[in-house]
Image (tube, helix red, strand yellow):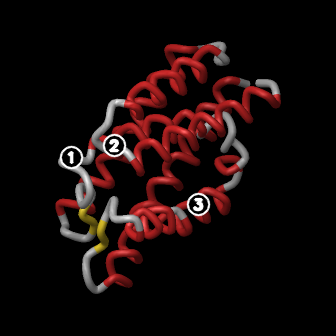
Amino acid sequence: MKKYQYITNGILYQITWFLCIFYPDKFYAWIAAAITLSTHLHFQKERLREFIIIIIAALMGYSMDQLMDFLNLLDTSAKSNSSTYLLIIWIVFACTFRSSFKFILKTYQRSLGLGLIAPVSYFLAQKIGVVKYSDPLYLAIISHMFLYSSLMSFFYLVNKKISATNE
């Protein structure tokens, strides 16, 4: 991939993220996600393989968020009638794993670090009313950090395996 492709991928991710956070029940985010996904896949040599990786990663991430919701640690539909905006975010986030955020999945420490700091974005989303952590706040965030770190560690291992088979 060329540098402009990484930048385009990151910018499209951010645009979609903001649309999901500020307009969770609107159709804008779906359009942005379709543009992000199609642009990302356009830049890939093995499109089907990349698409499968994205869908699996997105479903795993979304399932983690739904588990947090089920355990009453995180209310993912605080501002919206549903949490489908999180599925959109996970789809476009998965597009960044082997593109603009590729450097994160290169080492276990970076992947683990992302898992530890990622709940900050949920905390900020709570500040604008999109999600709501349960009380006690520290327990909900520590649980989220553990789950997210586990997921990012798994993604690191999968990415390492995929990269090894491509060489």
**Front one among 150 and 44:** 44
Residue type indicated by callout 3: Leu
Picture quarter with the C terminus? top right
At label 1, counting other C-alpha atoms closer than 10 Å, the crowd grade (few under 14, some 14-19, many 20 or more) is few
Answer whether labels 1 and 3 touch (C-beta < 8 Å). Answer: no
Picture quarter with the N terminus? top right
- Judging by the rendered image, the residue that carries numbered circle 3 is 114
Q: Position of residue 50 (x, y in %)?
A: 54, 23
- Judging by the rendered image, the residue that carries numbered circle 1 is 82
**Front one among 60 and 5:** 5
- Judging by the rendered image, the residue that carries numbered circle 2 is 85
Q: Secondary structure at mark 1?
A: loop
Q: Residue at x 47, y 67 (%)?
A: 124
Picture quadrant where residue 70 is located: bottom left
Using the image, tell me which numbered label, if any, was put on residue 123: none
Answer whether labels 3 and 2 touch (C-beta < 8 Å). Answer: no
Q: Earlier in the sequence, mark 1 or mark 3?
A: 1
